[in-house]
Amino acid sequence: MFKTSIFKHEKDEKNLRAQYKGADNLPLKVSAKAAWRMIKLYWGCKDSLFSWFLLACIVSLTSGAIYLAKVFNSWYKEFWDTIQEYNLPGFKYQLMVFAGLACIHVVVSVYNAYLRSCLSIRWRRWFTDKVMHDYLDNEAFYKMQLTDRKTENPDQRIADDLGSFVSATISLLLGTASDLAMLGTFGVVLWDLSSAVDMNIFGHTVHLPDGYMLYLAFAYALIGTVLTFIIGKPLVRLNFRQQRYEADFRFSLIRVRENSESISLYQGQKSEESILKRCFAEVVLNYINLIKKEKRLGFFTLSYAQTAVIFPMLISAPMYFAKVITIGSIMQINSAFGRVQDSLSTIINSFSTWASYKAIIDRLALFFDSMDACSNIECLKPIKEGDGLEIRELTVKTPQGKVLCSALSLPLLNLGSSLLIRGPSGCGKSTLIKTIAGIWPHAQGVIKEGEKDSSLFLSQRPYLPLGTLREAICYPGELLQDNSQIETYLKALDLGYLVESLDKVDNWSLMLSLGEQQRIAIIRALLIKPNMLFLDEASSAMDERIETVSYNLIKQELKDSLIISVGHRSSLLKMHDYILEAHENGDWEITDGNIFKD
């Protein structure tokens, strides 16, 4: 199973996890370790074999591009020397050489970019599939909401950050490798072009050693890198926060769309506008701080880059005027120095990109660690044994430790029987249902259910997936193409007008009222026919007549299934064989439901 955690196997794992939960950024050492683990996940598995081939092709093309750059460097000297000598045939020849080199350069560059994109999408597809599986596996998406609300917007981390991490890793790491290769290639060229020489500068004789231009390039880049790191350090934190605020704002807009009907009924437009403005204000405020820091960094990096244009000419001009070198040599020195300086200044030139990259790593690392941490949370799982449902010594608590029910025991509920759970709001009725479903971590006791029993849980607000109405009705079972059974149930529950829309694609959670959605969920249960059906306020939005029709259908079609309901209406009493009622003092009492039947 795919799991990764930045703090796993660390000596002080628990304290480290608590220290950095919800943090804006991580220490550089921790971020580097997290990035290495994420990279190794893909490149160390067998699924990456073809990607290794693509990487080899990219490296070959990059090597070819570096060789072409060296050829261009030599061409500069020959071209400008030809001009200085007024050699017209030589000038025409050099133009033809340039045309050939340029064509090769275009082909190499285009295929290099194309193969990088192919590599990126293969890696991203694999990575996203693995993360989605891990996110959905073992109810991690649900447990994270219970245990870690500081790791916000997991949807953005999967949809955006994963893709950004892959593309940035390929771009930055391959770019850095290319810069190092370029440095080695043109460092030799620059060394050869800067032989030891004595120069008269402002009346003073200065001795310059072999390779002095290379030394000057190193010194120039080192000073620039140190200053860039000092000026640009705040960008890491600001980039992290910007991604968070952008995701929060987008999520707020999504909530407005998903709850548009309720907002309209409440006339809550002004309140929602206020919330959206507050979220967007955080986006704007942080962005203003971000661009201010980038402005300071931009002044330095652009000044650094502009100075780098003239710097090699300044240090080579005395040799030209001393007639030691030609103008072609100056252009060659300028080109070689530029290549070396660019290679050494890779951090300066792309510091904002590196800062954004670190923010992405930190967000993914904290997200993965949260998933890994919640995987250790064990929910009370039902024991598959015998038939029906049996509960012994069950204690259920809230996440804060409040006891909802203590040592609750229920007699064996056989298939074909029914139980109604009642009580005041907040007593733990729905939590008890979640515990029986095996998705509540704060519970102890014994729950037994049949070895071959299948379960279906219907909540107060049913989940209707995007797609056709037929897909929504059949979810999560197999899609039924035969309309007869679906039509029968739709008409029985006064939804006959939806028959013509069975294959219409729409957002049905918005198109249908809550009462209609609940009836769709009842039809879903009738089609799936589970051995155990749990209805958590699943008929609360229906009128009593439709509710009665729904329960009669359930009893008729699912007569061999165990039905457990949660509800407040007194009309439900006569529809169940047993009543489990919670009292205000926290006690639970089960009674025979026959006393409520006519």
Image (spheres, rainbow, N blue to C red):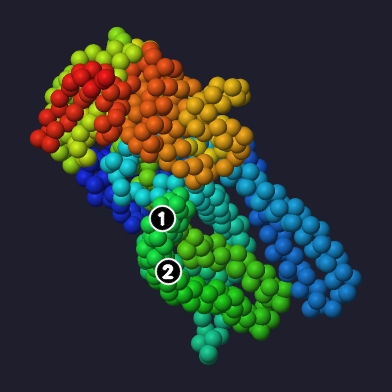
Residue 301 x, y percent position in the rendering: 50, 72
Quarter containing the N terminus: top left
Q: Is residue 222 above or below residue 519?
A: below
Q: Is residue 506 above or below residue 476?
A: below
**What residue is shown at x 60% (from left), y 75% (from top)?**
309
Taking the image as shown, residue 44 lies to the left or right of residue 391, namely right
- Residue placed furthest toward the top: 386
Taking the image as shown, residue 28 lies to the left or right of residue 520, namely left
Residue 472 x, y percent position in the rendering: 52, 33
The three-letter amino acid code for the residue at tag 2 is Val
Q: Quadrant of residue 97?
A: bottom right
Residue for badge 2: 284
Mark 1 element type: helix
Mark 2 element type: helix
Residue 114 x, y percent position in the rendering: 67, 48
Q: Nearer the viewer, mark 1 or mark 2?
A: 1
Residue for badge 1: 265
Quarter containing the C terminus: top left
